[in-house]
Image: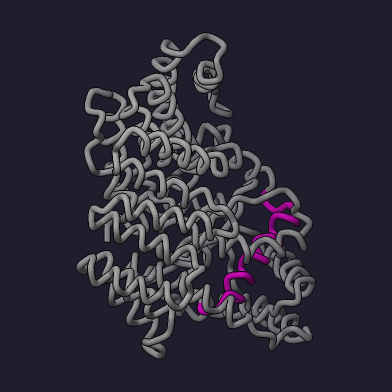
């Protein structure tokens, strides 16, 4: 799979924009597919984001990190997790390799310990100002670094105020590595946070032990997390002692939480390794709900839509209020070219979503967009905008918004949305070009005009002149 998690998104992106007269749309279409192929994907998935936020929330609170922290899921099979400013980056590989919620929660607690301890603060501050995409392409994965070398890592180097970035392993080592004393401090803080939230530190220990014994499942020789968080024997022994002294040590995650975790792993396994990945994961419980979920997703991606739909309906029967089953139903129907029914499924998902993810309304909007009639297009604009209200940095969503406006004939808004999409992807030059075009069509002083001006005026932090 070249484009995990974006199957639905990407297939729609790759479709030619209907508003062929829009130069903006053509530019977008090209850059969108390039993005999909570059392997730089940030995963946007309502289910995984909601779960990981649920993992992180109490820990961050216990750490006294009050302001909201955005969770960024990075499509990378190696194990990594780190926090910069208000953003927590977690590789899908880390989520997949963690067998229990407790294991990944332990890692989050350890990271929170680094933030609370002010470790690498100067560097974090500098990086925190860079756009998400620039950070991801620079720090994660050698392939990503090569692909981003021309623009993004350069931008990050500038954002970092002259930090020399050599690329690859060395960059990650120097940017994200911790001192041994910092590791010890972070371990101790993590244990405090876990204790405060009534959770065991066993999972954190399991994760670090796995690194030590090099039993990492990622296939990579060394996971990035292992390099930035060295695990010498004395550190493990200390951690073992501290963890085991807690009354919570033997406490397990609730079955409900474990099921959500398994469903998340099912999704990542399917989108990363297809059928084989799912089979490996559920060898011991092939008829459990998570395994059935995996099977439905495999059928959706690689099988026939009718069969996929039957499997999804089976899931919905078991958990009628699970928004992500309805979301998958929408994905299946979109692939089957039934946008009206897909729109209904997504509408249900949006309605059932307890955390009001910004991702689901965008999928709903895409289905409405595919219906293509003026009423549906207007509704698409409303939905995508409501998604963006919750989630301003969703660069992909602006592409659909641009398309909806384009089809409605509102070229100014289409070009502004295109500018926003480029802006949040870190492509500032393109963003300014489209903002300038949009501005010529807006009434001076109107909200669209003002926003276009903001983009035109934007100066990259640390960039000379
Ligand atoms: Zn550490």
- In terms of image quadrants, where is residue 248? bottom right
Which quarter of the rendered picture does the N terminus lie within? bottom left
- Residue in the image at 79% along x and 56% along y: 64
**Up/down of 330 relative to 391, above or below:** below
- In the shown orientation, is residue 25 left or right of residue 431? left
Residue farthest to the left, as pictured: 304
Depicted 343 relative to depicted 399: above or below: below
Magenta residues, start to end: 99-120
Identify the image quadrant of residue 194: bottom right
Q: Measured along the vertical axis of the image, is residue 24 above or below residue 77?
A: above
Which x, y percent locates residue 394? 47, 42
Which residue shows up at 38% across the image and 26% down it?
Answer: 414
The residue lying toward the viewer, choosing from 301 and 309, is: 309
How was this image coloured? one colour
Instruction: Give the prevailing secondary structure in the magenta stretch.
Output: helix
Coordinates of residue 273 in the picture (x, y in percent) = 31, 70
Tally of marks: 0
Residue depicted at x 58% and y 41%: 127
Q: 125 left or right of 316?
A: right
């Amino acid at each position: 799979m070249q484009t995990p998690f974006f199957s639905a998104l990407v297939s729609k992106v790759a479709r030619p924009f209907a508003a062929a007269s829009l130069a903006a749309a053509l530019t977008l279409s090209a850059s969108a597919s390039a993005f999909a192929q570059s392997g730089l994907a940030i995963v946007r998935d309502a289910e995984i984001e909601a779960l990981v936020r649920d993992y992180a929330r109490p820990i961050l609170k216990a750490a006294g990190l009050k302001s909201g922290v955005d969770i960024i899921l990075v499509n990378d099979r190696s194990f990594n997790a780190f926090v910069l400013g208000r953003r927590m980056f977690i590789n899908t590989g880390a989520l997949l390799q963690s067998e229990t919620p407790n294991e990944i929660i332990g890692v989050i607690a350890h990271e929170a310990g680094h933030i609370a301890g002010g470790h690498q603060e100067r560097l974090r501050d500098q990086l925190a100002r860079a756009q998400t995409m620039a950070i991801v392409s620079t720090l994660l994965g050698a392939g990503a670094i090569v692909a981003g070398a021309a623009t993004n890592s350069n931008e990050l180097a500038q954002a970092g105020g002259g930090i020399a970035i050599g690329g690859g392993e060395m960059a990650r080592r120097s940017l994200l590595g911790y001192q041994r004393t910092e590791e010890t401090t972070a371990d101790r803080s993590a244990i405090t946070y876990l204790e405060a939230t009534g959770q065991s530190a066993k999972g954190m220990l399991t994760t670090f032990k796995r690194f030590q014994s090099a039993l990492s499942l990622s296939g990579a020789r060394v996971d990035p997390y292992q390099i930035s968080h060295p695990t010498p024997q004395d550190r493990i022994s200390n951690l073992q002692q501290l963890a085991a002294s807690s009354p919570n040590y033997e406490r397990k995650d609730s079955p409900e939480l474990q099921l959500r975790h398994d469903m998340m792993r099912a999704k990542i396994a399917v989108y990363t390794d297809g059928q084989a990945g799912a089979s490996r994961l559920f060898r011991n419980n092939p008829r459990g709900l998570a395994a059935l979920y995996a099977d439905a997703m495999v059928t959706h991606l690689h099988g026939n839509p009718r069969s996929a739909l039957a499997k999804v309906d089976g899931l919905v029967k078991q958990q009628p209020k699970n928004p992500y089953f309805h979301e998958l139903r929408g994905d299946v129907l979109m692939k089957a070219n039934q946008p009206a029914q897909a729109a209904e499924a997504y509408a249900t998902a949006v309605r059932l979503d307890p955390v009001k993810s910004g991702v689901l309304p965008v999928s709903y909007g895409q289905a409405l967009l595919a219906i293509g009639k003026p009423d549906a297009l207007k509704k698409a604009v409303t939905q995508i905008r409501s998604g963006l209200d919750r989630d301003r940095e969703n660069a992909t969503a602006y592409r659909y918004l641009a398309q909806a406006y384009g089809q409605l004939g509102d070229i100014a808004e289409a070009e502004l949305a295109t500018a926003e999409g480029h802006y949040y992807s870190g492509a500032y030059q393109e963003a300014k070009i489209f903002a300038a075009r949009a501005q010529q069509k807006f009434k001076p002083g109107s909200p669209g005009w003002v926003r276009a001006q903001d983009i035109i005026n934007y100066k990259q932090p640390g960039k000379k002149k």
